[in-house]
Amino acid sequence: MASPSKFAHIVYRTHRYHEMIDWYQNVFDAKVQNQTDQLSFLTYDEEHHRFAFLNLGGEPSPEKPDQTACGVHHVAYTWDTVTELMAQYQSMSALGCKPFMSIRHGPTLSMYYADPDGNGLEFQVDLLDVEQANAFMESDAFHSNAIGEPFDPDEIVAALANNLAIAPLVMRSDQTASDSAIPV
């Protein structure tokens, strides 16, 4: 089998059609490519669409599955640097949208958000190159703690603003790295 060459798009079914479109426009600085009363297509880059929303109309029914039901858990997006990821965090915080979980996974620094329908989104930055990340995932440290450790994004924002070392804030306590190795 061949691996895909890139992320293409995701389609959401929603009862909160306009709220979802507004949220994705604000969070991703996305533009509407095409919109009808039933279906909308948005993009944030050169791709014709990255998101599509199918309007289910009305309010969700009481029979709608909860977050523990089968389905999409989250969709992940990668930023190039810690600075870019923290800028995204600050922009979203200004909109009243805070991550429900922030984790130093080891290979990545990740923040988890929920859109208006409760779909999970992981916003991350790679802290290690591919070879280092694969080695870490095979390590005893990762085996004993595959999830990682929580972190406070505001501490990283403050460290960046004051030109302080960020390695201790972004790397797990069982990892070592200098600031020069981190994509700031």
Image (cartoon, helix red, strand yellow):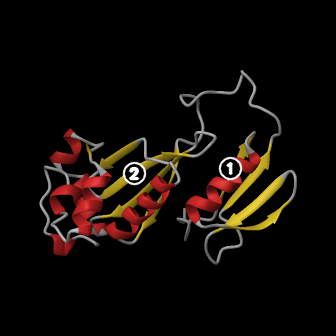
Distance between mark 1 and mark 2 Cα atoms: 20 Å
Judging by the rendered image, the residue that carries numbered circle 2 is 111
**Occupied quadrant, residue 127:** bottom left
Under tag 2, what secondary structure?
A: strand
Q: Position of residue 128 (x, y in %)?
A: 27, 66
Q: Is residue 119 above or below residue 81?
A: above
Task: Identify the residue at horizontal 30%, vertical 61% (top origin).
Answer: 157
Task: Point out residue 137 in the picture as x, y percentages from the top left corner.
Answer: 26, 53
Residue 82 vs residue 52, the one in the foreground: 82
Q: Is residue 23 left or right of residue 149?
A: right
Q: At which x and y percent is residue 55?
A: 80, 46
Q: What amino acid is labelled 1 in the image?
A: Met
Which residue, given by chain and number where applicable, does mark 1 sit on?
20
In the image: residue 182, left or right of residue 49:
left
In the figure, 76 relative to 17: above or below?
below
Amino acid type of the residue tagged 2 in the rendering: Met
- Tell me the quadrant of the picture where the N terminus can be found: bottom right
Residue 24 appears in which quarter of the rendering?
Answer: bottom right
The residue drawn where x is 74% and y is 30% is 60
Q: Secondary structure at mark 1?
A: helix
Q: Quadrant of residue 31?
A: bottom right
Which residue is located at x 23 percent, y 70 percent?
182
Query: Crowding near pointer 2: few (<14 within 10 Å), some, many (20+)?
Result: many
The answer to whether the residues at label 1 and label 2 have Cβ atoms under 8 Å apart is no
Name the quarter where the C terminus is drawn. bottom left
Q: Residue furthest bottom?
A: 46
Residue at image position (17%, 62%) is: 167
Mark 1 burial class by Cα count in 10 Å: few <14, some 14-19, many 20+ = some
Earlier residue among tags 1 and 2: 1
